[in-house]
Amino acid sequence: MSRFVLMFAAVIMAFSFPAMAETRIGVVDLRQALFSSDDAKIFSESLQKDFAGDEARVREAQEEARKLQERLEKDGAMMNESERNKLAGEFQEKVKEFNFLKQRLDSTVNQRKQAFLEQARPEVDAAVKELLEENNLDLILPSEAVVYVKPEMNLTSQLLEKLNR
């Protein structure tokens, strides 16, 4: 009985290996291709222009907080308690302001990036489908899911070319 099971398993394995060998798989780094595209570069420049003022306010608040902290560390020992408490309060307020401005900026930028990704998704999907057909592939995997890929099966540069058309 065990000899029969062993032989049956060997026959099944013999037939399954050729099927596995015929499966053609490509790999793409979607994030790299998308964020290296011409559209992404234009989007990034637009983002920098749109939020330059907000970034300047965040940096200014950070610098003011740093100066207050340095002054507190440097001169705090020579100040009376009320002066030290007042300066510490100013420092805490500036840190709160910085954190608020930074969080608001990050949230807004992330929303814009997400909108860009959603807008680009149909184009990326179409380009991936073209790669699948042009390279006669059965499957395209994201590079994050792959440990190693032969360079000729990494289709990221071809995807970038299609996105830049």
Image (spheres, rainbow, N blue to C red):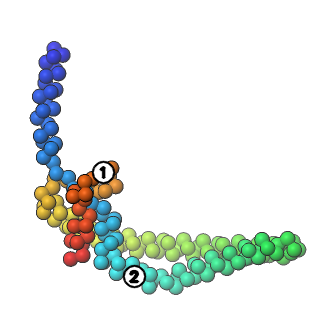
Whether pointer 1 and pointer 2 mark residues with C-beta atoms closer than 8 Å, the reply is: no
Left or right for 110, reference 151: right
Mark number displayed over residue 45: 2
Residue 14 quadrant:
top left
Q: Is mark 1 on a helix, strand or loop?
A: loop
Tell me if residue 40 comes above or below residue 31 in the rendering: below
Q: What element carries label 2?
A: helix
**Residue 80 position within the rendered picture, expressed as x and y whole percent measured from the top left:** 88, 74
Residue 59 quadrant:
bottom right
Residue type marked 1: Tyr
First in sequence: mark 1 vs mark 2:
2
Q: Which residue is drawn at 39% across and 78% down?
A: 44
Q: Residues within 10 Å of mark 2 (few under 14, many from 20)?
A: few
Q: Quadrant of the C terminus?
A: bottom left
**Residue 12 position within the rendered picture, expressed as x and y whole percent measured from the top left:** 13, 30
Q: How crowded is mark 1: few (under 14 residues within 10 Å), some or many (20 or more)?
A: few
Q: Quadrant of the N terminus?
A: top left
Q: Residue furthest top?
A: 1
CA separation, marks 1 and 2?
A: 34 Å
